[in-house]
Image (spheres, rainbow, N blue to C red):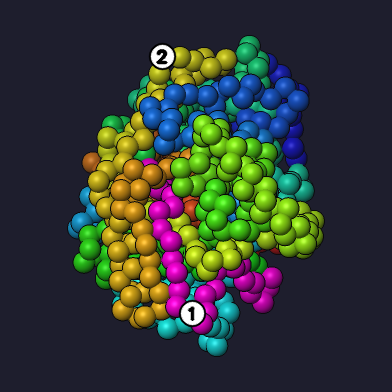
Amino acid sequence: MIIKGSELPEGGRIEADVAIVGGGPAGITLALELADSGLQVLLMEGGGGRTSPRADSFTGEVADGTRHPPLTLYRHRGLGGASALWGGRCVPFAPVDFEVRPHIPWSGWPIGATEFAPWYARAGAWCESGPSRFRVAEALGPDAPPAVTGLTDPDIESDGLERFSRPTHFGRRYRRMLAAAPRLRVVVGAMCVGVDTMASGRAVEALRFAVRPGHLFTVRARAYVLAAGGLETTRLLLASGIGGEWVGRFYMCHLEGKAAWARFRPGTSVIFAYERDGGGVYLRRHFALSPDAQRRLRTTNVILRIEPPAIADPSHVNPVLSALWLSRTFLKPEYARKLASFGYRGALPVGASALVLRHLANVTGNLPELARFSADWLLRHTLARRKLPYVATAATNGAFSLDYNAEQVPNPESRVTLTDKRDVFGVPRLHVNWQVTPQDTESIVAAHRALASALARSGTGRLEFDEDAIRGGYNAIGGHHIGTARMADDPSAGVVDRDCRVFTVENLWLAGSAVFPTSSHANPTLTIVALAARLAAHLAAQLGGHGQTGRADTLPQAAE
């Protein structure tokens, strides 16, 4: 059943066994995993009703807006949450990411990779990214060609894969399942504005929700789960004084950027375009530092991907890339930031008319190629149910750029705090002070050096990169809000335990990337969904549920 918050009486109360705040991938997965448990489940989503709360509740301050995007950019109110915006990239954490790494302060998860692995299979089913096969031989078969013919090196893993969701909009894809589940109620258009604890502070007594200023009601449950996203969950904890000293600290995104060109030996086969497995799922390859190299070089986990050349530089003479650059102001903000490479950001630089003319010349000089690309893009991206994720086209001069995605070192001084400004419901807004350490950027430099050495030793090509550009040219992937309510073995090092329960509150759990102790290089959604499925099994066991709930060996089947 799906109910609009505006239909609920002011001052009323709803009761359930489990109350979940947030209707994004974490909340929807958790609710549907519990749907057949015999428990009464309530899923609360702030957006989606006709009288949805005002979007300005997402606003806040960013200490350095040149590096970190505005807080409104990657957040979305409505059933499905940020899955309405994502590109669908699904990557698991590597075993090394779960380990205590002596060279990475505050590293280590209370759960290990082996224990966690089965939940990735279930997460892949919910995300529609296919089976958990993230190596070339596993996904494409033992005879699949390497990414770069002749490149073998102990420091560089070149057989890693990213898998791509449709991308799945969780709200649209699973709406009918949510509506049909007999013991599940979904309330949309009602935002959580407070977590009330009992006098002892050891248990949640109720959650407060607002449809609009003055229209309030409460929710009571046996178990409460905050799954409202890394920033909103943190804001609720801070505003309610829950969770202890570590709430809001260790804020991590991922560092991304471009600072390298690769030129390969003539005749070398290079695979950089998207491939598809037997189920039609799109795949993409990347280079990664091996775990041994990470330990020896004392780096974080960094991947490098062969990309089309920087679109801002018209010397690529590619009509598709020039058309993308000329139209970049009409793209989604996340793609516009992705395409704004090598110094050309936002508005055109002074005296840029010559640059525009060169791009126009590229476009008009090869209209047939642009037309072929446009038709293919229409078929494989715009109209397709499983969409080609991104543009992968080569330059005429044989050069490829490389981009990087990099893990951050957990840093307690990188933090999210409250301001004295409040939203329309009276909840304090956020201040984000995202900080980058020298170890973060030097890890990226080390990864480039390692790949350059591997290419040189193998004779397959050369890598040219600018270390100063790496140290000064990174950005935050602003939709990855990680680590602000971290998981740990005990309260001296974190906010939640290995089962995502808040240490200081016996009936409150968290779901989402806020609980990640470390970030890996991986996009967080697949791991968020895996953790939510795992949490469902734990809650069902704790609360006396029954049925096929949260089992890693049974996969969900969604109605179209």
Looking at the image, residue 249 lies above or below residue 7: below
Q: Which residue is mark 2?
A: 420
Asked whether residue 546 is drawn in magenta, I would say no
Expressed as whole percent of the image width and height from the top left, the position of residue 11 reads 64, 16
Q: Nearer the viewer, mark 1 or mark 2?
A: 1
Q: Report helix, strand or loop for mark 1.
A: loop
The answer to which of marks 1 and 2 sits earlier in the sequence is: 1
Identified at 54% across, 27% down, the residue is 58
Amino acid bearing label 1: Pro
Residue at the bottom extreme of this rendering: 143
Identified at 77% across, 48% down, the residue is 176
Q: Nearer the viewer, residue 551 or 256?
A: 256
Expressed as whole percent of the image width and height from the top left, the position of residue 97 reads 35, 60
Q: Quadrant of residue 505?
A: top left
Does residue 495 appear left or right of residue 361 in this picture?
Answer: left
Q: Report helix, strand or loop for mark 2.
A: strand
The span picked out in magenta is 252-280
Does residue 18 appear left or right of residue 160 in this picture?
Answer: right
Residue 266 is marked as 1
Residue at the top extreme of this rendering: 214
Q: Nearer the viewer, residue 196 or 96?
A: 96
Mark 1, Cα crowd under 10 Å, few <14 / some 14-19 / many 20+, is few
